[in-house]
Amino acid sequence: MGEAAHPADQQIVTAGFVVIGDEILSGRTKDRNIGYLADFLTAHGIDLAEVRIVPDETDRIVEAVRALSERYTHVFTSGGIGPTHDDITADAVAAAFGVGIDFHPEAVALLSARYGNADLTQARMRMARIPDTASLIPNSVSQAPGFKIRNVHVLAGVPSVFEAMLEALGPTLAHGTVVLSRAIDAHLPEGRVADDLRRIQNAHAGVAIGSYPQYDGKTFTTQLVIRSRDAALLDRVAAEIENALTRLRAQA
């Protein structure tokens, strides 16, 4: 009989991510934020459970933000909060929650300090438009802030700014129990280890076992990655896998 998936002392916190931008979908811009966010959240004990990439279309952004906001503890978005006509994320998020949007005094002050009155153009002022009830997310790189409304964190798409905003957010986020992981090189092809992995996985609900085939040009091998919030369970499953691999190698 398998162990319980989530013991009472383990806190499960989840997240969804909405990546916004036609340039991502066209391939013109190669996304770097998904991997960074996944690493960041894993380190904070937050499970990134879903990523959606949507175009610069209000209806699609509204739909994605609403769906993920209802499903997960945290939602993050990237892109669409700059000064140009296609930066529509702030308006779309306001629409998603049925609130108004206007110039935020603190955001205006930040941009005024950054650009000065002469260079604070009407286009740049768009970056100070924040949905009602939202709080600002600091931006140490270029000062133009992101914002948080309910459980949705709206961040810039430029990787350096996205990362700076995320670092500012870190201490404010609800964290969960960190997932531990261990990698085992099987030195066998996936087909040889699949049956034993299935048996071990089915017996231990509190563990996720991933199987990743590799090919060096001559030989197929497999790396196994075990993930769990329970250190003792992780050790036990790792030992079972090592025993199975030893037996399979002897049969080779």
Image: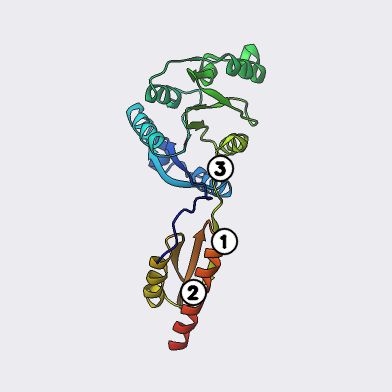
Q: Earlier in the sequence, mark 1 or mark 2?
A: 1
For marks 1 and 2, give the CA distance.
Answer: 14 Å
Q: Residues within 10 Å of mark 1 (few under 14, many from 20)?
A: few
Residue 83 coordinates in the image, percent (x, y):
50, 23
Residue on which the image places disc 3: 175
Q: Earlier in the sequence, mark 2 or mark 3?
A: 3
Q: Residues within 10 Å of mark 3 (few under 14, many from 20)?
A: many
Residue on which the image places disc 1: 231
**Res 86 visible:** no
**Dot 1 lies on which element?**
helix
Image quadrant holding the C terminus, namely bottom left
**Dot 2 lies on which element?**
helix
Residue 22 coordinates in the image, percent (x, y):
39, 35
Q: Is residue 227 above or below residue 171?
A: below
Residue on which the image places disc 2: 240
Residue 19 coordinates in the image, percent (x, y):
44, 38
Q: Amino acid at mark 1?
A: Ala
**Camera-nearest residue between 12 and 143:** 12
**Camera-nearest residue between 3 and 181:** 3
